Amino acid sequence: MPAICTNRKFKALTLVEMLVVIAVIGVLFAVFINAVSHHRFRPTWVKCTNNLKAIGFSFRIFANDHGDAFPMGVSTIKGGSMEYVTTDEVFRHFRAMSNELSMPKVLVCPADNRKAALSFAVLSNTNISYFLGANVADTLPQSLLAGDRNLTTNSVPVGAGLLDLTTNVTVGWTAALHKHSGNVVLGDGSVQQFTNARLQEQSAHSGVATNRLLIP
């Protein structure tokens, strides 16, 4: 009976090649998933940025009609919301700008699960995705006017209410909405995309010793 030669080297190479192919497929799959995730994430980010641009522009229009003051610095008698600065009713300040904002839907980030109000008459905090700077003024161009609400202080998620940010507080973002980053419109109307580090830096150079933020 003739001897049968077994090519062990061929079998070993085939196994190695199979492992290489599996590894390559794994890498390609990971790249594909990342690309799909980025593709879905970017439109949400852009829409959020556009919302905050509209909000910033609305503040500028309001200020032009009210002696360069934002709603938080104008009495309710004159169409502002000054009397509500010390409360947690964030919606009052945006409602004061209903004419400038035109539509309540710009107050909701597309990455947020909150729903836009049907009208400004029924607007509440639950229809708002963005914090508001209570002590921001037209004369403070680098102040935090409004931004994504998913903030943290000293790595602890922030709840609704008034938040006083001082220089000894470490501020950042949760993973919600924009994956440990967020959008902020400054006092000059410009919208910035901030990482945790950039948000901390901006809050320290905002022009005020304490950033008073109203969280919806």
Image (cartoon, rainbow, N blue to C red):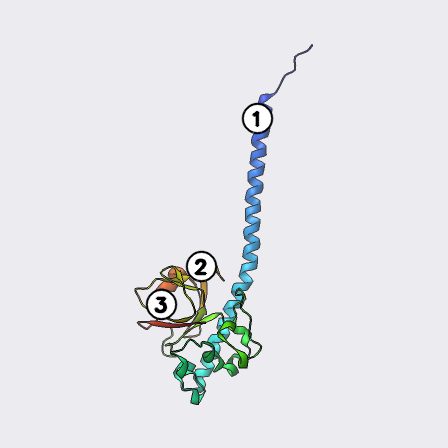
Residue that label 3 marks: 203
Residue 18 x, y percent position in the rendering = 59, 33
Marks 1 and 3, the one that precedes in the sequence: 1
Disc number placed over residue 207 in the picture, else none: none
Q: Quadrant of the C terminus?
A: bottom left
Q: Looking at the image, which is closer to me, 99 or 192?
A: 99
Residue 125 position (above or below residue 170): below
Q: Looking at the image, which is closer to me, 132 or 88?
A: 88
Residue farthest to the bottom? 77
Residue that label 1 marks: 12
Marks 2 and 1, the one that precedes in the sequence: 1
- Per the model, the C-alpha gap separating discs 1 and 3 is 60 Å
Q: Quadrant of the N terminus?
A: top right
Q: Residues within 10 Å of mark 3 (few under 14, many from 20)?
A: many
* Type of the residue with mark 2: His
Q: Looking at the image, which is closer to me, 158 or 11?
A: 158
Residue 104 x, y percent position in the rendering = 54, 76
Residue that label 2 marks: 180
Element on which disc 3 rests: helix
- Per the model, the C-alpha gap separating discs 3 and 2 is 16 Å
* Type of the residue with mark 3: Ser
